[in-house]
Amino acid sequence: MHLLEIDSQGEIRLTEDLHDGIPPYAILSHTWGDDKDEVKFDDLKHESWKRKAGYTKILFCAKQAKKDNLKYFWVDTCCINQANFTAYSEAINSMFRWYRDAAKCYVYLPDVSVREGDENHIKRTWKPAFRKSRWFTRGWTLQELLAPASVEFFSQEEERLGNKETLEQQIHEVTGIPIAALRGASLSQYSVEERLQWAANRNTTKKEDKAYCLLGIFDVFMPLIYGEGGKNALDRLRMEIDKSGSKPFTQTPAATSAPVQCDSLPSSTEGNVVNDPRRGSMTADEQGKYQRLLRSLTFERMDSRLLNITNALPQTCRWIFDEEKFKTWITRNEVEDNHGFLWIKGKPGSGKSTIMKEALKMVKREQPRDIIISYFFNARAPGILEKSSVGMYRTLVHQILQARPQSRGLFSQMFAMKDREGSVDDWTPTELQGFLTDVVESLGDRTLDVFIDALDEGDENDVRQLVAFLEELSHRAVACSTSLRICLSSRHYPHISIRKGLHLVVERQDGQRDDIDRYVRLRLHGDESHGTNRLREQVCQKSSRVFLWVVLVIPMLNELYDHGLVAAMEARLKELPETLDGLFAEILARNAEGIDSSVLLLQWVLFSMRPLSPVELYHGIQLALASSPIEGATSMTKETMDRYLLNCSRGLIEVTRTRRPVVQFVHEAVRDFLIGENGLKQIDTRLAGNVKGISHEQLHTACLRYFDQCLPLNPDYRGESVPKWGQPLDLQQKFPFSEYAVTCMFPHADVAESSGIPHRAFLRRFQSKDSHDLLKWIQFRKSFQPRKVYEYAIDVHLLYILAERNLANLANVLIDDGVDANARGGLYGNALQAACVKYHEQMAKLLVKSGASINAPGGHYGNALQAAVARSHEPLAQLLIENGADVNAQGGVYGNALQAAVARSHEPLAQLLIEKGADVNAQGGLFGSALQAAVARSHEPLTQLLIEKGVYVNAPGGLYGNALQAALERGHERLAQLLIEKGADVNAQGGHFGSALQAAAARCGTSIVRLLVENGAVGRSTGNGRQVA
């Protein structure tokens, strides 16, 4: 790697080719101008290079690097010797790593100006120019955006526009790349097709570069063959991706953006790899590795709950620091008796989370040497990880790696092992528990403080296992004399016992009573008269020490005070129920005016398929209330919308303080009340007996109404294809409810159907392939989620869509209505294969029962069995085999089911197929044979199994030509030796290297070359022009 260096005279010169000890450097990202204007490698030998137009960019990069105290920088035009194909090929295969390891990446945008017109005009215009910049259309700039930790954008005047973090929303909207990926989430967690979609609309000068520019995105390497054409290059890329073990279709992370930082509490993602001061002493390579470690643990909204907990009022929550049990815990007195455990319990709404947040702040402030980690469970979260122990473990480990650098070595070993297996984004509780145990046992003289809030908001079995682990962890800490403190909080139910620990009940503490009294005195309007003081005392007494009760009651009393009805305040207080459930019912029943809107709002928040933004919720309510289109909604201000929703909810909902705000209940207790016996079914008797079904039907009807009245069919439709309607950003602005209406219209109908509400007439609108309703639905679905619906084309039918989305209740109606269960269409060929690919067992059973052909050929995987096996779904494979699946059916990417099982390294499925008669010598597919697939995947047990079953070791064909070449090209010397022992032909021709000897010379050590020669391998010219002496 050549770098440019700024010498002591301020001159720019090229370094020698650096292999080791590469210093910190900056890197330039730009779009090429005319070839003659760019500064090339050989130009640097002559002073005239400074007269080229491209010198301006190099000089800009040099000046910016100097500002950032970086002596070295890299610019692709002149740091790569393009005349030397070997050097050029190495650079292309190393490009992603070079950008990833850069300390800074500067993006120079010559088509974005900040000096056009007056200052106010500038503020309105540079961002549109930024969105339209040519830089977003080029293939090579995709990896230049994603690889570096720090990416900064500059205008043509060299003025800084922002960085990847501050501009992430605009970048996301322009590119369609998830914000998590922009923030550094591991790219391997996104499917191959999704990553290809990011590059779909980008162009390169050379057709082959459309593939070559994606090597780093998929972490694969391959030789460059200019002249092979774009299609061949992409085909080779896909083969390399498959060799690397990437799953073709994997679930993507939630799209919700991470929260805005607030308060004084650092979050799990604060001090990330870009700004972490501890990285100052790392080499570029170490920084890259550390970045990957953290990316494998992060997930969207990992700190959302903590950030949305209301801060305590001044002088409240201080009582806990004086409470004897807390002092015993914090000072580690009697640790043999309590094992460093403190469990804070309380009624719903008693203020436990606020107390935990204050305790966490106090310990951070008072115990600066401690390693302090925390997690706040969130039952209202849209994602699974926020309310699961896996999400908790990932967050805690993430925080430890930031707070305790010496733990990174241990975690790096675990990471490297999982990286080799291709499972770095699939951490299990057991793996992360093992790391935490090792950390506790090696703490030395430091203390580890663990705060975990709202245990009751996780799955009960999950939480019981978590508590058992924490008990074991505390026992180990006592046994090895290390300092561990664990503070938990939860409701009283479900009750989970621990052998040793301190218990503190919030509502029994005098301090908590004093906090409520202080809150009431601060918030309840009135003077210091005897009557007002008596009212305050009555509020405190009636609250039963439940903070949430007080928070909801005080606004009711203040409203009377503001209307001059002071005398009525005490009477109103006496009327109010003492329990939270009773209070919720009272709040909703006290005023019949607007109750329909209030009920609809609660139904939307309770039963929506995902959390809604305020504008989406407003539209949802209006659509359910009226049959006419909404007028003027898009022109309403945020403040007006928020006031309307707050009034409708009667104080029972809140808008989250996140980058993309969504609406949620003020407390989980509200949800518990609404789904209970005295909840919605009592508030609106029309819902009695079928709250869930009727609610989902109302929401479905609102979505359908918006679909019918507000969403037009794309005028470009001519019948031969199904175009997208438009870009997501434009659609959201023009049709704010469109994404939800299109995405959730069918799922709401499916739930309502399961509750006995028929949808036959609705489905008939979409049954015909030339139905304009179906075409319009596909248009909008494509526009919002192209990575999920790229396969929806003119041949797709409704049953296929329902099968892929696991809407079995609606699918059953279609089949009952006479729809052909074997209708062909879609990427996977038919509904059964689609259900198998997506792991939808219930849907697959329905289709099989309804007469779907088990062995129907076609689709990406050739048949349903190969799809189930390729997706490693053993129960589905069993189901299909039991119903007559042909285990030797040919076709699809792997040729047959056995090769698919072996390619996915799934030993039990391979054994099952062989037991059911699968031919171990069947030919075809990506690897040519099951044996070549086993060897390519380095799977020795499967290789042994196939040999024991009589596999032919010299079968030709496939990606590597034969099994022996697969072993050698992948560097698996032991497997190569095994194959030779079993009679592999050491002189068989074919494959990438032409012969086994050539492959061994390129990929293996001298010992394996010697072994081949000893077994008769001879050097010869090969068909690809290589020669072995």
Image (cartoon, rainbow, N blue to C red):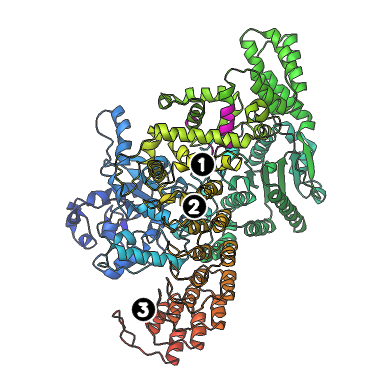
**Residue with the mark numbered 3:** 993
Query: 181 left or right of 87?
Result: right
Q: Nearer the viewer, mark 3 or mark 2?
A: 2
Instruction: Determine the residue positioned at 49% across, 75% down.
Output: 930
Considering the numbered disc 3 on the image, is that residue within a helix, a strand or a loop?
A: loop
Q: Quadrant of the N terminus?
A: bottom left
Considering the numbered disc 2 on the image, is that residue within a helix, a strand or a loop?
A: helix
Please give the label number shown on residue 933.
Answer: none
Of callouts 1 and 2, which one flags the residue occurring earlier in the amino acid sequence?
1
Asked if the residue under mark 2 is in contact with the one under mark 3, i.e. CB atoms within 8 Å, the reply is no
Is residue 282 visible in the rendered image? The answer is no
Cα distance in 3D space between marks 1 and 2: 19 Å
Using the image as rendered, state which of residue 850 and residue 971 is in the foreground: 850
Query: 751 left or right of 252?
Result: right
Using the image as rendered, state which of residue 929 and residue 580 is in the foreground: 929
Considering the numbered disc 1 on the image, is that residue within a helix, a strand or a loop?
A: helix
Per the rendered image, the range of residues in magenta is 599-615
Please give the label number shown on residue 760.
Answer: 1
